Amino acid sequence: MDAPTNFRDVLRRSPSNLRGEVPPPVAENPLRILFVTSAHNSLSQRAFIALTEMGHDVTVQVVDSPEIIEAAVNAHEPDLVVCPMLKQFIPESVWSRYTCLVVHPGPHGDRGPSSLDWAIELGFDEWGVTVLEAVEEADAGDIWETRKFKMRPVGKSSIYRHEVRRAAVEMLVFAVHNFARGDYNPLPLNYEDPNVTGRLRPLIRQADRAIDWRADSTANVVRKIRAAEGHPGVLDTIAGAEFFLFNVYVERGLRGRPGDIIATRNGAICRATVDGAVWVTHLKPKAGPAPYKLPATRALELAGIVPDAPEIPVALHAPIPPGYTYREISYEEKGGVGYLNFDFYNGAMSTEQCRRLREAYLYARSRRTTKVIVLAGGADFFSNGIHLGVIEAAENQGEESYYNLHAIDDVVREILETDSHITISALSGDAAAGGVPFAVAADHVVAREDVVLNPYYQHMGGLYGSEYWTYILPKRVGQETAAELTSAPFNPIGTRRAVDIGLLDAAFGDSVASFRAQVQGLAERLARHPDVGHWLEQKRRERAHDEQIKPLAAYRSEEMARSHECFFGENRSYHVARSLFVHKTGAPCTVQVPAAPSAEPELTPAQRAVTKVRQAKPSSAR
């Protein structure tokens, strides 16, 4: 008797090309490329993946001064310098000797440090990205590539992670290819050309962003906070204390006196405007012991402020239209499929969020009107694992780390033990650390084609981690590959390789909308498939077999014992690395790769510090 049709057969029979983008060309002349970047963020990671897949030798150097840029270039002597996201000026000693390609998040001719901020603040429908050559004057060099895109009504960080990132990476691939040819002539910046639509814009300052709660409409408040999303936020005053505001949602039902906090929900605060209200989910104190982003009510609590406002919950499954209110976790059903959406800010999942997510998943699993559950995550992130910010702000950081890891383990266990439904993780956004095994705990895992995965923990001061990764990852990719993925040098993984090694089943979709539409079609085909019963029975047998070999409880116990040592042992590396990351005072780790012996003169300390350095931060770094 033939085996029942499996998931990959359903993928192959889909009318869509679910494998995604055309394989990149192999570089005819591989280059030694040095990335000089202010943070190894989502864009630089995706660019690193694209260029290394082409065969280029890419080294990443995170810099915070012109002197470090100069030392890095002198140490590496690259063929090409690429600056995916750079806040520092490139010294003349570098751009005069090397071609330096700079990614600027603005259209042809746009210049200045607040490009995307102005695009949102001024309400532009269209914006762009430009790859230009560094010269003495910032953003004024010759143009190698430029693209335009339609703006979405979202925050700056989301535009950066999607439209900007995709266009920038595609342009860098072309620009590097043209540079390697050696006969390409970039276009000089010419403001007399009518096609040059950008211009020099000043730095947006907090005075430009200030909210007047007695006069600004809801639309104005939303626009101002969205324009400052990610960094620097909008400086505002609450109960006499100064905070930066982040992550805003419109509230259509509640009203109150403009500026007042009129409700709270799952850590967010709702503030009334002159014509409605908005939810603000995160605050960052301007000063104090915890000057980093935290859930709004927690940040207020640490400042000694307790809002005189009710906690107003919202039902998980209530049929609320998009844009009506703020809801972190939601559930809906279509065509025999249950969709569990969880949009956690920057992908971080606190103890409390994990517990609410587990309850939501149990509800989805209890539904007998469905046969498939899709874990949809959020548009920008699927999950980045435990919430380092909430942990940093805890009275006992070791205990909170331990509770948080157990809470996310509880979610993963429920997924692994589900025998009533086919489960699909659908990654519209990136995943890192514990978010990767959490995602691949599902029966099937698909991702948007330019998602970035960082499936490692140990960059965070040697944290061992849990989420049953010692069971899930080897089962997916084999023991040897699992060890490689979770060890230094902690390189990000693109979807092409993730599919090749079996970490993902497929990658497709050039946008969140197209990806989710294809996921819906795939999930509904699975729910209607006549072999669902066979698949579920096969799933039960496989889980029972694995449990006999080694119980899930044993994997969890071993992982938590190793993590317990990180949380409570004498070695404080995890706590130091977490603090550096949360406070943004340094990279969590630096991996040194020794240079080959040579007869060259001994390098200076500054040069040695940057030789073959690869620095990696989680994908939420921007």
Image (cartoon, grey):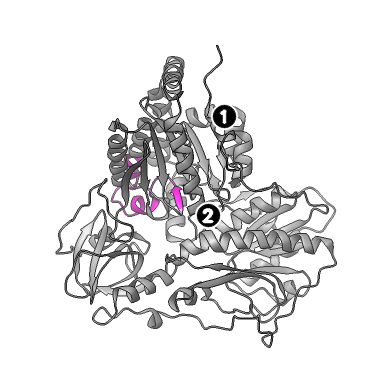
Q: Which residues are magenta?
A: 381-404
Left or right position of 302 against 43: left
Residue 468 - label: none
Left or right position of 16 against 563: right
For disc 2, the marked residue is: 511
Q: Compared with residue 90, is residue 193 higher up or lower down, i.e. above or below? A: below
* Residue depicted at x 27% and y 54%: 320
| Mark 2: few/some/many CA within 10 Å (<14, 14-19, 20+) | some
Q: Earlier in the sequence, mark 2 or mark 1?
A: 1
Number of marks present in the image shown: 2
**Residue 59 percent across, percent down from the top left:** 69, 54
Residue 220, image quadrant: bottom left
Q: Is residue 399 magenta?
A: yes
* Front in this rendered view, residue 353 or 147: 147
* Residue depicted at x 26% and y 53%: 266
For disc 1, the marked residue is: 9
* Residue depicted at x 83% and y 54%: 29
Outermost residue, top direction? 1
- Amino acid type of the residue tagged 2 in the rendering: Ser
Left or right position of 225 against 128: left
